[in-house]
Image (cartoon, grey):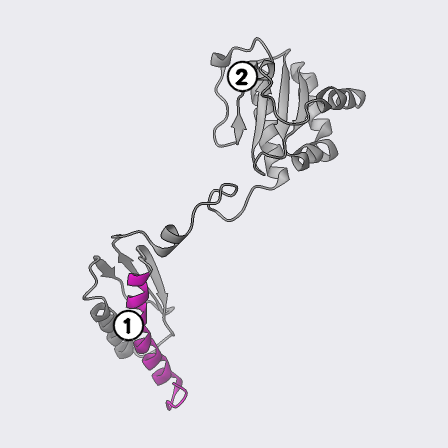
Amino acid sequence: MTGEDNIEETAYRTNMEALSEISRQANLRGLSGLIVVDFIDMLKLEYCKNVEFAIKQAFKDDKAKVQFSFINDFGLMVFSRQRIKPNVQEINTTECLRCKGIGRVKSNEVVVASILRDLQHIANKNQNKSFDLIARSAVIAHIFNNKRDMVSTIEKEFNITLNVSIDNSLDADTFILKQGDHINFNAYKPLQNSGCQIVNSRDKEAGKLPGNFWLTKWLSRLLGSNN
């Protein structure tokens, strides 16, 4: 549209040409829900009205129910489209097992914070007990490098012992907090959405405890030496 006489005319004709493609892409991709179109700003009210009418005409043969708003002062138009089929992303992709579809995983700092929160919660309910923590090596290293004093404080406050073990087969933001023997599992409920998994102590006797569990006593002594 570089041949137009002024910017306003260029914006108007460019927006009008985009309407058929907006309709086509919404149908091809199976878009649904609220959709926002960012039109080039137009100062003339007449041009805005023409674009609003034209986009409704572009969607008139759409099988899905479509409802339109008006173009606001920022050139944005919001319209809703009924969901009638899965979109392209759902058909051609699967959810990531590590990030659960959000595209990112929790940092070691956040995972360790969840561990300490859950440990303090269950230690308060089950004092004078021992607990086994199983996590990836990067998470365990973060605890020893940055949170050792906090772990020692929890151990002293509730008179517990925390043993740690490494299992790099776990997801980046997953850990297992295993309670020691003779714990009443009905006495508390673990915190929700923290990644904490409660494993029965009988799994250890059955040889199901993953990772290098021989590190447990060595790391426990290391924690005790720093108290």
Residue 213 visible in the snapshot: yes
Image quarter in which the N terminus is found = bottom left
Q: Position of residue 67 (x, y in %)?
A: 23, 59
Q: Which residues are magenta?
A: 1-28
Q: Amino acid at mark 1?
A: Ser
Which residue position holds label 1? 20
**Residue pictured at 23% horizontal, 73% vertical:** 54
Magenta part, dominant SS: helix
Residue 227 visible in the snapshot: no
Between disc 1 and disc 2, the foreground one is: 2
Which residue position holds label 2? 200
Q: Position of residue 194 (x, y in %)?
A: 52, 31
Q: Looking at the image, which is closer to me, 8 or 65?
A: 65
In the picture shown, does residue 38 fall above or below 117?
Answer: below
Mark 2: few/some/many CA within 10 Å (<14, 14-19, 20+): some
**Residue pictured at 27% horizontal, 52% vertical:** 85
Left or right, residue 103 beside residue 169 = left
Left or right, residue 10 beside residue 20 = right
Q: Picture quarter containing residue 73?
A: bottom left
**Residue pictured at 60% horizontal, 38% vertical:** 110
Asked if the stretch drawn in magenta spans residue 22, the answer is: yes
